[in-house]
Image: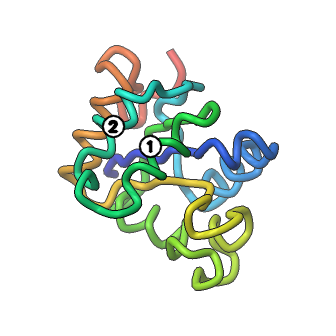
Amino acid sequence: MSRTLAIIKPDATGSGKAGKILAHLEAGGFTVQALKLVWLTGSQAEEFYAVHRERPFYGELVEFMTSGPCIPMVLDAEDAVVALRVAIGATDPAEADEGTVRRLYAESKGRNAIHASDSDDNARREIGFFFSESELLSVGAGLR
């Protein structure tokens, strides 16, 4: 088992799709190890997405991620990073495979319902951004 981070974005929380997305991921074999509802501040969103600072969409992304609550979650699965990227589909929902989260629940390329870590290193960094060690369940430990 390995671990990754997903974030149900403000478009999906605001349109009532968060529960469907979570159910979709659990049905796809992911186990939730931590989850919380947060409303990112501008500085938090800027820090989290700092890797994109030089990209033309950075300002729009920060504005979008601070527009409403989102749900970061830690997920466990076999090869979790790759498995989650497959499960959510392409960034543009029009290009995402049938049955993927973005094909089913995203509005557009910019309002694409969910974030997923793109590497094991980024997963560790991103998990640490949102969760302390005490907030994480141990793999296989179940509820405490």
Q: Residue furthest left?
A: 121
Expressed as whole percent of the image width and height from the top left, the position of residue 90 reads: 51, 76
Q: Are marks 1 and 2 in contact (CB under 8 Å)?
A: yes
For residue 17, above or below residue 89: above
* Residue that carries the numbered disc 2 in the rendered image: 46
* Relative image position of residue 81 (x, y in whole percent): 35, 59
Q: Which mark is residue 76?
A: none
Q: CA distance from mark 1 to mark 2?
A: 6 Å
Three-letter amino acid code of the residue under disc 1: Val
Q: Is residue 75 above or below residue 109?
A: above
The structure residue drawn at horizontal position 75% and vertical position 40%, both measured from the top left corner, is: 14
In front: 54, or 78? 54
Residue drawn at x 68%, y 48% as measured from the top left: 11
Side of 112 relative to 124 (left or right): right
Tell me the residue at 57%/69% (across/down).
109
Which residue is denoted by mark 1 in the rendering?
62
Relative vertical location of residue 11 with respect to residue 57 in this rendering, above or below: above
- What SS does tag 2 mark? helix
Instruction: Give the amino acid at mark 2.
Output: Glu
Residue 36: quarter of image: top right
